[in-house]
Image (cartoon, coloured by chain):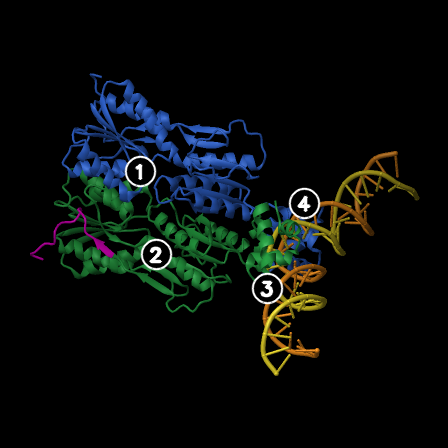
Chain colours: A green, B blue, C orange, D yellow
Amino acid sequence: MVTIRDVAKESGVSVATVSRVLNQTGYVHEDTRKKVMAAVDNLKYSPNEVARSLYKKKSKLIGLLLPDITNPFFPQLARGVEDEMQKGGYRLLFGNSDENAEKEMDYLNTFIQNNVVGIISATNNKTKTNYKDLSIPVVFLDRTSSDYPSVYADGKEGGRIAAEEIVKRGSKRITLLKGPAHIQPAQDRFQGALEALSQSTVDFHVMSTTSFAFEDAEKWAKELFATYPDTDGVLASNDIVATAVLHEALRLGKSIPEDLQIIGFDDIPQSSLLFPSLSTIRQPAYEMGKEAATLLVKLINKENVQQQHIQMPVTFIDRNTTREVDAHG
Amino acid sequence: MVTIRDVAKESGVSVATVSRVLNQTGYVHEDTRKKVMAAVDNLKYSPNEVARSLYKKKSKLIGLLLPDITNPFFPQLARGVEDEMQKGGYRLLFGNSDENAEKEMDYLNTFIQNNVVGIISATNNKTKTNYKDLSIPVVFLDRTSSDYPSVYADGKEGGRIAAEEIVKRGSKRITLLKGPAHIQPAQDRFQGALEALSQSTVDFHVMSTTSFAFEDAEKWAKELFATYPDTDGVLASNDIVATAVLHEALRLGKSIPEDLQIIGFDDIPQSSLLFPSLSTIRQPAYEMGKEAATLLVKLINKENVQQQHIQMPVTFIDRNTTREVDAHG
DNA sequence: TCCAAATATGTAACCGTTTACACATTTAAA
DNA sequence: TTTAAATGTGTAAACGGTTACATATTTGGA
């Protein structure tokens, strides 16, 4: 490993001068600067971030905690975060919590121990994992919080829109799928849909699900049609579940959207590739990631942040699992 | 921040003793150990990994470099890596390269500067990004390499199987989609399929594609049916492309699998939720991630590794975009 | 010409650990 | 009882950077 001392020796100056050249701080004579840079190139020196981090008590690392990167909603968030962080030269220490409090604590610990300068967390753990006594900024992503800066989509509004759209398009016996209880965004969208449905004149029933995993999605779908065979509209808790419902409905020989309308939530990339392509409520995941990153960087730089709670708009994506708007209302 | 010195003071011993307690090295009297542990609990001390890393010149960090986490094949790999690394207490420094040599170099640099003890890379960059002069172990994932330890699926065999299966099931005019030229696994599967097809008696044509992105997949699909409208079998370069082909075929009113058979590659989680569910060549992504992690940890620990090149089996997943095996051959 | 400010550079302390080494003290074999 | 080995603990030097401070030297206005 080539150190700053090697560069100092090679260029015939002190380590302080080398450091000054590298960090562009203090006064350095142009000739000296050139000599040092030459030595740097020569020796292919690149400063040890660990040593830097130790002295300065801050790194160029950001902690990113997601529930599960395997859920197709999150890679987009992650890319948004990464692409934005990249610009500021920040790198990601990354972990999946599986919504498990212990793992969450573990990662938080790791982040701190490694001098990260900020954390973006998309976990929904109810238990008070202590973000409180962290001395670095935290931004919650895909999760509302009154206590902390956060970036999230308007889930309630999304649920409401989904319900209104499916009603407007003529579904009369709707099944509303309620997502996992511990996942706040799932509850928000559920509440929004529930309210809208309650105010409408259609029949509906609620079916609870307890996970967003691929392996389980098929199960909820089968259960849905077994329990409510005459359903003619499904408001799914997310696009994965919607995909499973679509799959099962087609398997049962239903015509989509004639016999059954389906609206998902998230608008994951593959939703547009389904057949029929999935109508859904879009969360701008990539942009949310970017917003969270931007916000966090501002907080790190102690810039004055006007808006600590960024609510992203949610839009209805009208594809082919929903019908034309019913003119008769 | 509470340091080892605070603990030393609190427990009335020297920092060396505290360190010995924490690392369970050297001799420590049981009473002393208890005093120290009490102080640790008391002060909620947890050692600064940065300082540790600086002195020991090694961290508990692993660099993970993927092409693009947004491609649904990679989250699985990543989870496999993470879950296995977790066991050894390793954490991930994570980046997406977009198969871009500069980004790759940047991340490699970051990894080194942060004292990672090993790297797992799934990039396919042709240009000689210098993994050579790294002094830490590197495992290539989803990428064959004679020079470096690697974990990969048998792409060629996968391509061969796909071709054989689609022929066996009666497709006569096959379109073979060739994946991006710079992605080796895509070429391997292509070569395998090409060979098998060449040895068969069916007609086939090759169509080249240049990316695996969602946004482009639909384009290839449309192009495919515009150019080769009488195709009755498609060997897709991966499941995303296969999904797009399926989508487009259904949109054009084709019956699947009667008019057209499709075989994908990867077996990403959503493939089983398509309708009809996608027949595909499965790569055990999660297991590959785990294998790569296991291998890397062994290399880090300088254990004797018998097999540096781990080829994972590839299997045909017979779902509903392929027909029953044609009895007439 | 003088002198304060600006420029240029080096020395050494510091960041929070680990560990080599020195120095007790205790244990137990002879 | 002696003493070598085993046990227990502390001091200080690393690790590779940054920066406060000291010390020139140069610049340029009065």
Is there CB contact under 8 Å for labels 3 and 1? Answer: no
Residue plotted at (49% across, 37% down):
B293
Q: Position of residue B315 (x, y in %)?
A: 34, 27
Q: Is residue B136 left or right of residue A174?
A: right
Circle 3 or circle 4, nearest the eye: 3
Residue stretch in magenta: A315-329
Question: Hey, what amino acid is under mark 3?
Answer: Tyr
Q: Which mark is residue B210?
A: 1
Callout 1 amino acid: Thr
What secondary structure do most residues of the magenta stretch adopt? loop
Circle nearer the viewer, 3 or 1: 3
**What is the x, y in percent for residue B267?**
32, 34
Mark 3 Cα within 10 Å, few/some/many (few <14, many 20+)? few
Label 1 vs label 4, nearer the camera:
1
Disc 1 to disc 4, how far (Cα)? 55 Å
Q: Secondary structure at mark 3?
A: loop
Residue A303 is tagged as: none
Q: Mark 2 falls within which chain? A: A
Residue at mark 2 to residue at mark 3: CA–CA distance: 42 Å
Residue on which the image places disc 2: A288
Give the chain of mark 3: A
Marks 2 and 3: CB-CB under 8 Å?
Answer: no
C-alpha separation, residue under disc 3 versus residue under disc 4? 46 Å
The residue that mark 3 highlights is A27
